[in-house]
Image (cartoon, helix red, strand yellow):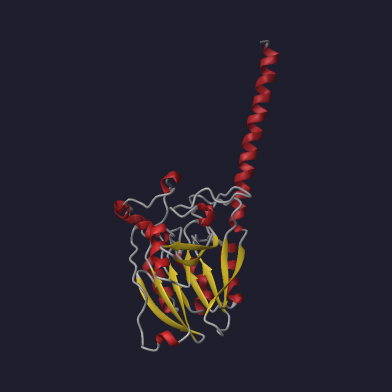
């Protein structure tokens, strides 16, 4: 090959390589920008006792707060304008050791409403870079809770105290009732199944007239593993709420999620669906989440979201 021809060939190869790199950088930039395309998904469910007025639940999950996320803070604060009857937070609130103050600032207006919550692993520990394949389709090894570096522990106790001082109740492996607008809301929840900390507490017990009063049964988990959902469905809740999946986070347009970060079918990685076990079934709302791990700050075809669920009478 002549020197001139070789130079021409190398020049074309370099141009193609440069174009590929530029295209990749552009795609990453767009995927990062998409983490700020906040959306509100609205759903309606006829699950309240007959004659009961409409009841709204604001479901938030996977905030993954990092200091300096001003657009996320403003959007979260604006959700208070929805005036929900109940706020449900299904965990993974943090993504940085200094994220608690920023989180409380962002959630401040929502803390004025009745609320319940369960934690996720990124409430307890800051994220570290990991092989994404390690998260696909399986629960973690039981010893995984021992492998966290103590230096990664987040100030979850202060976060939980702030929630408690505002009146939000922790449903981790607990069951309780709270009255909201004349409706008895029975709540059962589990600690994070992704860390194998889940223990089902059943339903709360109360007075002998409980069955005659209007009530709503909610079951909460951060990670929607099949085993947890099976237990919940057999306990006959009116609604199951979960997060964790990020809706797949990097989805294929017109196809959806490729992974759910647990053993939940990818077709149910976000949105409202049904979960059935042994002839019992319950509606399941899986939030696609508001944030993303700071180690993977990208979203593709899966915008960050909160859910406003309007419950109506049967």
| Res 74 quadrant in image | bottom right
Rendering coords of residue 282 (x, y %): 48, 67
Q: Is residue 82 in view from this perspective?
A: yes
| Residue located 60% across and 65% down the image | 41
Answer left or right for 221 relative to 287: left
| Residue located 64% across and 27% down the image | 14
Q: Nearer the viewer, residue 109 or 304?
A: 304
Answer left or right for 56 relative to 90: right
| Residue located 56% across and 85% down the image | 51
| Res 12 quadrant in image | top right
Residue furthest out toward the top: 2
Q: Nearer the viewer, residue 139 or 147?
A: 139
In this rendering, the answer to whether 74 lies above or below 268 is: below
Residue furthest out toward the front: 279
> In which quadrant of the rendered image does the C terminus lie?
bottom right
Rendering coords of residue 48 (x, y %): 53, 79
In this rendering, the answer to whether 37 lies above or below 213 is: above
Q: Is residue 155 in view from this perspective?
A: no
């Amino acid at each position: 090959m002549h020197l001139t021809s070789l130079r021409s060939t190398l020049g074309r190869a370099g141009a193609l390589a440069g174009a590929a790199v530029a295209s990749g950088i552009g795609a990453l930039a767009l995927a990062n920008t998409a983490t700020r395309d906040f959306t509100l998904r609205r759903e309606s469910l006829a699950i309240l006792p007959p004659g009961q007025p409409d009841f709204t639940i604001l479901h938030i999950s996977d905030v993954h707060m990092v200091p300096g996320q001003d657009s996320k803070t403003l959007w979260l604060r604006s959700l208070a304008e929805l005036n929900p009857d109940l706020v449900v937070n299904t965990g993974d609130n943090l993504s940085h050791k200094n994220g608690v103050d920023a989180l409380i600032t962002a959630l401040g207006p929502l803390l004025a409403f009745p609320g319940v919550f369960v934690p996720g692993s990124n409430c307890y520990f800051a994220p570290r870079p990991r092989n994404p394949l390690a998260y696909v389709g399986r629960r973690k090894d039981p010893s995984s809770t021992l492998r966290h570096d103590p230096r990664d522990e987040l100030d979850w106790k202060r976060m939980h105290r702030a929630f408690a001082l505002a009146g939000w109740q922790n449903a981790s492996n607990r069951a309780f009732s709270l009255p909201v607008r004349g409706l008895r809301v029975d709540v059962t929840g589990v600690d994070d199944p992704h860390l194998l900390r889940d223990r089902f507490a059943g339903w709360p017990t109360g007075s002998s007239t409980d069955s005659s009063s209007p009530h709503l049964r909610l079951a909460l988990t951060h990670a929607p593993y099949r085993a947890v959902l099976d237990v919940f469905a057999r306990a006959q809740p009116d609604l199951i709420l979960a997060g964790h999946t990020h809706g797949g986070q990097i989805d294929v347009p017109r196809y959806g999620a490729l992974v759910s970060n647990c053993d939940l079918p990818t077709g149910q990685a976000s949105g409202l669906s049904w979960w059935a076990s042994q002839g019992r079934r319950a509606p399941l709302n899986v939030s696609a989440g508001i944030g993303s791990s700071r180690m993977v700050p990208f979203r593709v075809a899966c915008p960050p979201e909160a859910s406003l669920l309007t419950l109506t009478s049967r």
